[in-house]
């Protein structure tokens, strides 16, 4: 057996990569190390912090679930069908990724605030967008739904069309084929897209800030504490929130990975 | 039972045009053609996976050209089986029944029955990814058959199997056909056509150029293409008697052949270029020497074809020089010799 030796130039590439890794890890580690366990425990007991973490997790999860139901079938159409202006549609889906998120929040306000069709309609059925949960979810979804749609579309595109044809030939309706063949086979992509959307929604600041300063999601709370009390008070909240996000992220990844093995 | 009239369809690089043929109830209809002539498109159009650009499809006298796929009840076994990889074999087989609203009890019973019939009971709980080619093909058949289709379409069902699995699958397909199932089988392999077909349709460049029973297709190819594509002029049904030296008995003749096949019914194929014509019974290594009378002689693309009646009509391909040198003509008495090793046996 010959050991693969690294070319000198590859060592340089790896050295450069190490700098980038350091750039990501060092600030996070620095923040973690300068926060004591006592501070963390105290922060965790702070009802304002706990409430905002719960709100952030649930709002993002709610936005992900609602938009998954609506946009996963659409992702299937994008993967399977040809139609006019399809490229334009794909471009529109990616739009939220490139526009500044505060601008996205301003744009969103324009259609959900009082006096607009959706805003008034929501008010009539008791859904409050501006300064309400619905508004937070809308802002989170606006900036994060492209991740779900793109992942689901790629997942569906990877399902062999032959299998869907076979299912139709066996007498299944198109809806049944979608639910029993396409979705289960694209499930990993849909799930990882959902995790990505959920994580992205949770970390959203700009768009939510514009639409709903209150109730306060954790990124807004961190910003407020920083502005009002300084770095020392903002840091423990940030560390706690990152920890919670990471924990959920890892658990979901493991669950998604476990499915992969089961499908073997 | 299944009638295709003037069917045309273009799909990407492949196209079929003006295809017409007729499959009778209980027929084993083999569509024979080189790869890329549009055989798969034809099957997909018949099942309703795609719709034709022109033409009609009739099933039991009823037009089904625009009928949705799930209402047609024409089974299709895909070339690569298309088993659902995320389901067990049992769920694969049950899929069609459940899709048609069968209850759990009936689904279980029918799945078990078909599994027993096709000998796949032992791996019902496995995933398709763990099956061998022959096993997967039997599962694909079971999945199609359990919904009791009125007609079964097979896309190259033997091509993905190894030699040993192939003869078992052939026997299975024949048994299904004999039990009354109408079948349409697409292949590029003329041996499959010989072994299975009750009728053959030959496809060339996207259309069906000749249909008929096998002996008609092989003995009287309608075009130069068919003759060349089929590549054989002599094929005869009969019985193989195995033993020290294998013998093949047909039409009152006995032929020595080289084969390790099992005894039983089958066909032999002799290429016309392997039949030697002489004026005297020659002393050569050829084991099979028969006297006969020339009944026909005509030029073909390469050389001269001589038909000799030795009890059956056998075609020999000779050069123009040989034909002239030997003075071959209709009515002349000659000897034909065939090496045992030049006779190819195909089990039925």
Image: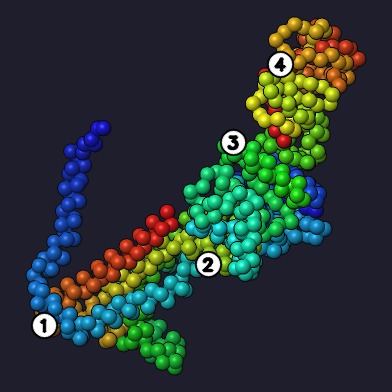
The answer to whether residue B281 is seen in the rendering is yes
Name the residue nearer the viewer: B92 or A164.
B92
Name the residue that disc number 1 marks.
A229
Mark 4 vs mark 3: same chain?
yes
Q: Secondary structure at mark 2?
A: helix
Q: Residue at x 64, y 37 (%)?
A: B167
Q: Which residue is mark 2?
A: A179
Percent position of residue A181, x then y: 53, 61
Mark closer to the observer (4, 3): 3
Q: Position of residue B323 (x, y in %)?
A: 80, 11
Name the residue rendered at 60%, 68% in the picture: B104
Mark 4–mark 3 CB contact (< 8 Å): no
Nearest to N terminus: mark 4 or mark 3: 3
Crowding around mark 3 (Cα neighbors within 10 Å: few <14, some 14 to 19, many 20+) is few
Marks 1 & 3, CB-CB < 8 Å contact: no
Inter-mark Cα distance, 2 to 1: 52 Å
Of A90 and A149, nearer the camera is A149
Element at label 3: helix
Q: Which residue is mark 4?
A: B339
Q: How many marks?
A: 4
Residue holding disc 3: B164
Alpha carbon separation for disc pair 4 and 3: 26 Å
Residue at (66, 47) in percent of width and height: B154
């Amino acid at each position: 057996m010959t050991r693969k030796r690294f070319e000198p130039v590859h060592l340089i590439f790896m050295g450069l990569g190490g700098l980038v890794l350091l750039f990501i890890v060092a600030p996070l580690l620095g923040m973690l190390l300068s926060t004591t366990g006592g501070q963390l425990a105290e922060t965790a007991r702070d009802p304002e912090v706990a409430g905002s973490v719960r709100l952030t997790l649930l709002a993002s999860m709610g936005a992900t679930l609602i938009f998954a139901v609506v946009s996963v079938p659409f992702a299937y159409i994008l993967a399977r069908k040809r139609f006019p202006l399809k490229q334009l549609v794909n471009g529109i889906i990616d739009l939220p990724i490139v526009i500044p998120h505060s601008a996205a929040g301003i744009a969103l306000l324009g259609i959900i605030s009082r006096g607009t069709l959706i805003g008034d309609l929501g008010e009539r059925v008791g859904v409050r967008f501006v300064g309400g949960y619905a508004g937070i979810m809308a802002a989170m979804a606006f900036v994060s739904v492209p991740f779900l749609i793109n992942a689901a579309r790629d997942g569906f595109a990877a399902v062999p069309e032959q299998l869907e044809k076979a299912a139709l030939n066996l007498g299944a309706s198109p809806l049944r084929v979608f639910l029993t063949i396409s979705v289960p086979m694209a499930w990993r992509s849909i799930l990882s897209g959902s995790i990505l959307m959920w994580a992205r929604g949770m970390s959203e600041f700009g768009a939510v800030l514009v639409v709903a300063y209150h109730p306060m999601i954790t990124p807004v709370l961190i910003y407020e504490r920083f502005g009002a009390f300084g770095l020392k008070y903002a840091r423990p909240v940030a560390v706690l929130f990152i920890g919670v996000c990471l924990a959920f992220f890892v658990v979901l990844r493991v669950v998604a990975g476990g499915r992969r093995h089961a499908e073997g | 039972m299944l009638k295709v009239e003037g069917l045309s369809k273009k799909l990407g690089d492949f196209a079929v045009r003006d295809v017409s043929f007729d499959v009778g109830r209980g027929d084993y209809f083999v569509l024979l053609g080189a790869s890329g002539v549009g055989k798969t498109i034809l099957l997909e159009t018949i099942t309703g996976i795609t719709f034709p650009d022109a033409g009609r499809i009739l099933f039991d006298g009823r037009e089904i050209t625009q009928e949705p796929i799930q209402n047609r009840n024409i089974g299709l076994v895909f070339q690569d089986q298309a088993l659902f990889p995320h389901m067990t074999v049992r769920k694969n087989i049950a899929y069609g029944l459940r899709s048609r609203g069968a209850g759990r009890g009936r689904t279980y019973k029918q799945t078990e029955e078909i599994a027993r019939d096709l000998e796949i009971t032992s791996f019902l709980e496995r995933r398709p990814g763990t099956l061998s080619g022959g096993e997967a093909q039997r599962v694909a058949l079971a999945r199609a058959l359990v919904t009791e289709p009125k007609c079964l379409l097979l896309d190259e069902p033997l091509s993905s199997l190894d030699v040993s699995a192939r003869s078992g699958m052939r026997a299975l397909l024949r048994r299904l056909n004999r039990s009354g199932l109408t079948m349409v089988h697409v292949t590029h392999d003329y041996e499959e056509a010989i072994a299975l077909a009750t009728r053959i349709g030959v496809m060339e460049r996207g259309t069906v150029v000749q249909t008929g029973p096998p002996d008609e297709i092989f003995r009287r190819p309608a075009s130069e293409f068919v003759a060349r594509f089929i590549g054989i002029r002599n094929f005869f049904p009969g019985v193989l008697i195995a033993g020290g030296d294998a013998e093949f008995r047909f039409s009152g003749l006995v032929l020595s052949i080289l084969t390790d096949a099992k005894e039983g019914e089958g066909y032999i194929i002799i290429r016309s270029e392997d039949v030697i014509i002489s004026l005297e019974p020659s002393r050569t290594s050829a084991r099979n020497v028969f006297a006969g009378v020339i009944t026909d002689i005509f030029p073909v693309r390469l050389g001269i074809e001589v038909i000799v009646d030795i009890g059956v009509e056998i075609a020999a391909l000779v050069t123009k020089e040989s034909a002239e040198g030997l003075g071959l003509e209709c009515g002349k008495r000659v000897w034909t010799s065939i090496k045992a090793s030049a006779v190819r046996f195909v089990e039925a």
